[in-house]
């Protein structure tokens, strides 16, 4: 017998059973649609988008098995079979004693922070996602980001660029006092930092620091499977391990987790809040009942719980994860070859273009990221999102001038199991064309905004001539 031959091409490890047509449009039509949307792609109708890379959240395709689970969903108000399937699966992978279902990640954050946080508290993280930060600030506490220094330099590669700066954590605990820190958080992968993974060693070290100071460690587990795959690929000692065991080890260092199942739950809605603390779980369940629902459904239908339980197993499949991470890296490699400055290395769920480096002729005040996002839509019907001064610019109340964000990025987030390689090849071709014409791109002027989270509804007008 010949030895097993391995081939270089990594294919989508699924075949397509159900299709959803996408609508072709012309550049002229898209220019009109974008103008009507105030040059803000959030305000477009999804039907008018050809390739939608706005987010990887809730936009994944469910498997045949998940759709079958939808039919099996038990819609009993209390004690539904689907709840037990869901809770047993979460417990098996994540290891926490108490599992509360919620309708999405931010609901878990709101319940957690309104239970453990007091006004004046400080919550450190490698980098908080914006809803996490908002929920911490809502209760009068301060959210502090402590990424390693490499995370602030887009072009500097690092295998675990999502790591927390443990020296900075020690210094913060010393200056703030442990009693002011209700918990420490690690976001895996670090979405706002470019979808970058956190190493097992970093989780372990942060956990040891927390134990020494009597602090809780929580994991924002949205993209835990992608993070664990990176550990398997990049960290010594994990190459032969099953990802589920890597996940079990990682969560064994933590006291609890929040999770949006709209990402690595491979579901369109849902999430959970998990803890090992009995008293805390009781308090959280009381709040859950107030706004989400009875603790065995937490604002979800039984069928949603079923889809998540199945999705959490499917996401740990090695063939799936190899394809997932390889296809994101494929887009990153081709864009780099064209000349695009990217956050390096490519993250798990998204590619981040450094729009400030790509469009140095557009100052932050004219929103280079938004200019690129608009041109990607006009050129090829691709919808991306600006992660720069539109999203994070802060008006200075004294001068009325705006303080720009630290980076002007554009995120191309890849929905799970939705687009094939030819869709991605199309994105690459469109972006090669846009790259050639980059010097002709013009910035925008903000004409209407409603802070906070103004990026969802802001309206713009283009400055000067538009490229053809
Ligand atoms: N934490 C992280 C790291 C996230 O990326 C998100 C959502 C949340 C929490 C909140 O979860 O949306 O279910 O309430 N991220 C989406 C995105 C919206 O596009 O990155 P949610």
Image: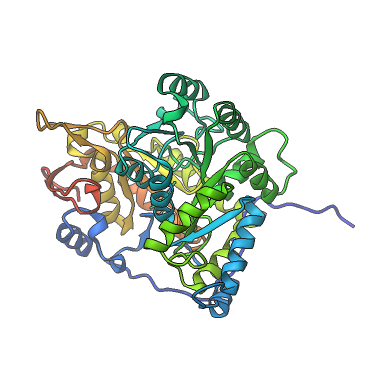
- Residue 72 in the image: above or below residue 233: below
- The residue depicted at 33 percent of the width and 70 percent of the height is 23
Q: Where is residue 100 in the image (x, y as percent from the top left)?
A: 51, 58
Q: In which quarter of the image is residue 364?
A: top left
From the viewer's perspective, tell me whether residue 136 is left or right of residue 30: right
Which one is in front, 273 or 373? 273
Name the outermost residue toward the bottom: 71
Q: Quadrant of residue 370?
A: top left
- The residue depicted at 43 percent of the width and 73 percent of the height is 20
**Count of numbered circles in the view:** 0
Q: Where is residue 428 in the image (x, y as percent from the top left)?
A: 41, 50
- Residue 382 in the image: above or below residue 354: below
Q: Is residue 98 visible?
A: yes
Q: Position of residue 258 (x, y in %)?
A: 49, 49
Q: Is residue 11 visible?
A: no
Q: Where is residue 272 in the image (x, y as percent from the top left)?
A: 50, 56
Q: Quadrant of the N terminus?
A: bottom right
- Residue 379 in the image: above or below residue 347: below
From the viewer's perspective, tell me whether residue 309 is left or right of residue 169: right
Q: How is the image coloured?
A: rainbow
From the viewer's perspective, tell me whether residue 113 is left or right of residue 214: left
- The residue depicted at 52 percent of the width and 41 percent of the height is 218
Which one is in front, 198 or 203? 203
- The residue depicted at 59 percent of the width and 62 percent of the height is 87
From the viewer's perspective, tell me whether residue 210 is left or right of residue 171: right
Which one is in front, 287 or 431? 287
């Amino acid at each position: 017998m010949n030895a097993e031959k391995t081939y270089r091409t990594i294919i989508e490890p699924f075949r397509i059973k159900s299709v959803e047509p996408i609508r072709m449009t012309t550049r002229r039509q898209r220019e009109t649609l974008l103008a009507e949307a105030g040059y803000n792609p959030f305000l477009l109708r999804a039907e008018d988008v050809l390739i939608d890379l706005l987010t990887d959240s809730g936009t994944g395709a469910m498997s045949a098995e998940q759709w079958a689970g939808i039919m099996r969903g038990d819609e009993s108000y209390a004690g539904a079979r689907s709840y037990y399937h869901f809770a047993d699966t979460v417990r098996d992978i994540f290891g926490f004693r108490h599992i509360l279902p919620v309708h999405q990640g931010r609901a878990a954050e709101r319940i957690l922070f309104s239970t453990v946080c007091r006004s004046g508290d400080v919550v450190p993280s490698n980098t908080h996602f914006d809803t996490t930060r908002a929920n911490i600030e809502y209760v009068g506490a301060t959210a502090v980001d402590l990424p390693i220094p490499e995370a602030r330099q887009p072009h500097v590669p690092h295998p675990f660029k999502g790591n927390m700066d443990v020296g900075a954590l020690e210094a913060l605990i010393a200056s703030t006092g442990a009693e002011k820190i209700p918990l420490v958080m690690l976001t895996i992968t670090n979405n706002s930092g470019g979808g970058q993974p956190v190493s097992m060693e970093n989780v372990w070290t942060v956990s040891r620091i927390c134990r020494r100071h009597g602090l809780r460690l929580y994991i924002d587990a949205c993209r835990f499977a992608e993070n664990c795959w990176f550990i398997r690929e990049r960290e010594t000692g994990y190459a032969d391990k099953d990802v589920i065991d890597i996940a079990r080890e990682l969560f064994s260092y933590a006291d609890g987790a929040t999770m949006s199942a709209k990402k690595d739950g491979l579901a369109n809605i849902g999430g959970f809040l998990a803890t090992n603390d009995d008293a805390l779980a009781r308090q959280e369940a009381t709040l859950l009942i107030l706004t989400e629902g009875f603790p065995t459904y937490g604002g979800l239908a039984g069928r949603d719980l079923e889809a998540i339980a199945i999705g959490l197993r499917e996401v740990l499949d090695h063939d799936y994860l190899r394809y997932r991470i390889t296809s994101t890296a494929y887009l990153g490699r081709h864009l780099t070859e064209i000349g695009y400055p990217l956050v390096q290395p490519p993250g798990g769920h998204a590619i981040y273009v450094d729009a400030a480096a790509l469009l140095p002729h557009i100052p932050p005040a004219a929103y280079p990221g938004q200019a690129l996002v608009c041109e990607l839509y006009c050129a090829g019907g691709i919808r991306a999102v600006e992660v720069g001064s539109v999203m994070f610019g802060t008006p200075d109340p004294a001068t009325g001038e705006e303080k720009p964000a630290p980076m002007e990025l554009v995120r191309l987030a890849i929905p799970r199991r939705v687009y094939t390689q030819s869709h991605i090849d199309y994105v690459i071709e469109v972006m090669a064309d846009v790259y050639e014409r980059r010097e002709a791109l013009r910035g925008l002027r903000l004409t209407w905004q409603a802070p906070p989270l103004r990026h969802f509804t802001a309206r713009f007008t283009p400055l000067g001539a538009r490229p053809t």
